[in-house]
Image (cartoon, rainbow, N blue to C red):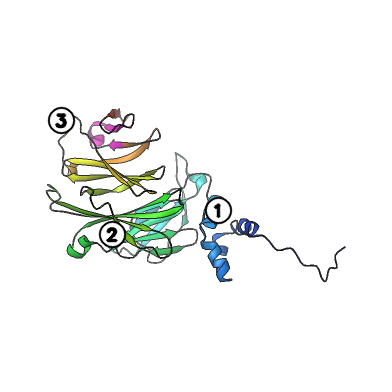
Amino acid sequence: MHDSKSWVAPEITLDLLMEILARLPAKSVMRFKCISKVWSSLFRSSYFCNRFYMLTSSPGPRIYMSLMDRVDYSKSLLLSSAPSTCSPSSLVFDQDLTIPAMGGFYMRVVRGFISFTVSYKGRIYNPSTRQLVILPAVPSNIIAEEEIYNICYFVCHDPVNDQYKVLCTIAVISEPEDMQKVRSELWVYVLEAGGSWRRVAKDIQPHLPDALELTLNGVLYYLAWTDSHTCMLVSFDSRSEEFKMLQVPRRVGDVLPRVDKWMTQIEYGGKVTVFDFTHLKESGLWKTGRRKNGRARDWFYRLVRCI
């Protein structure tokens, strides 16, 4: 029998400690980071972050909505719907995730992190901990030489190396109508301590990206234009950082320029599909196209009528 005065509780193993802490609310985790450098380092470890994300992620879908004042960009709201309210008939945005002077355009959500753009700079926001990270400026030649340019930030996750990466596309065109001259640069930033921008794919064909992207199986996809009539499906492998470009073919008689086309990419049947809804309003038709059997020149098209 142990003497109650001399008995010492056994030390909690690190694995058990991680499991206990991963079940705490986000606010408690933020407070406990101040206990010691060891605990602060523990909370920043990739294992704890992934474990915390798995345990706190809701089983159902969550929809985010960003509202901004068109005159004063600092006046903004970031709302979220609870998973139980994501029904086909109604949505209730009952969670306010806004922080002061948040602002931002092109909100993207990746594994619990939210990215957006403010004054041409990328920002990463963790709604659980209310932490906001402002990415450093991109050392781009285009930014240094041009006053007006197009910039997009895409966030993706490398599941093999467990890394979050930001792909920044910067482009400038001669005229929106003809696009006779296109310049572009691609930069990658790894979200880790000491991270910095690296220019990649310097030999890729210059292109103007669309603002919407799709991530599927660790590969990021977006549509881009090399001229006013040539649309490309661009893919970025988050692990190898390899880019591929595939021209999206047009149907016979389709001569509309980029400024009159409405297209994006979606997931359909587990594959990336180009969704063309240019004529949806007047004819009730939209077009989907995707590669067949993985061959670059073999595309399958389908016309769908909206009833």
**Residue at 58% across, 71% down:** 36
Q: Amino acid at mark 3?
A: Gly
Q: CA distance from mark 3 to mark 1?
A: 53 Å
* Disc 1, SS: helix
Percent position of residue 252, x then y: 17, 29
- Per the rendered image, the range of residues in magenta is 274-295
Q: Which residue is mark 1?
A: 51
Mark closest to the chain's N terminus, 3 or 1? 1
Separation of disc 2 and disc 1 at Cα? 39 Å
- The disc at residue 70 is 2
Q: Nearer the viewer, mark 3 or mark 1?
A: 1
Q: Is the Cβ of the residue at disc 3 closer than 8 Å to that at disc 1?
A: no
Is there a contact, CB below 8 Å, between mark 2 and mark 3? no
* Image quadrant where residue 115 sits: bottom left
Mark 2 → mark 3, Cα distance in angstroms = 39 Å
Compare residues 74 and 240 and report the one nearer the observer. 240
- Classed neighbour count for the residue bearing mark 1: other residues with Cα under 10 Å, few (<14), some (14–19), many (≥20): some
| Vertical relation: 298 (above or below) 89 | above
| Quadrant placement of the C terminus | top left
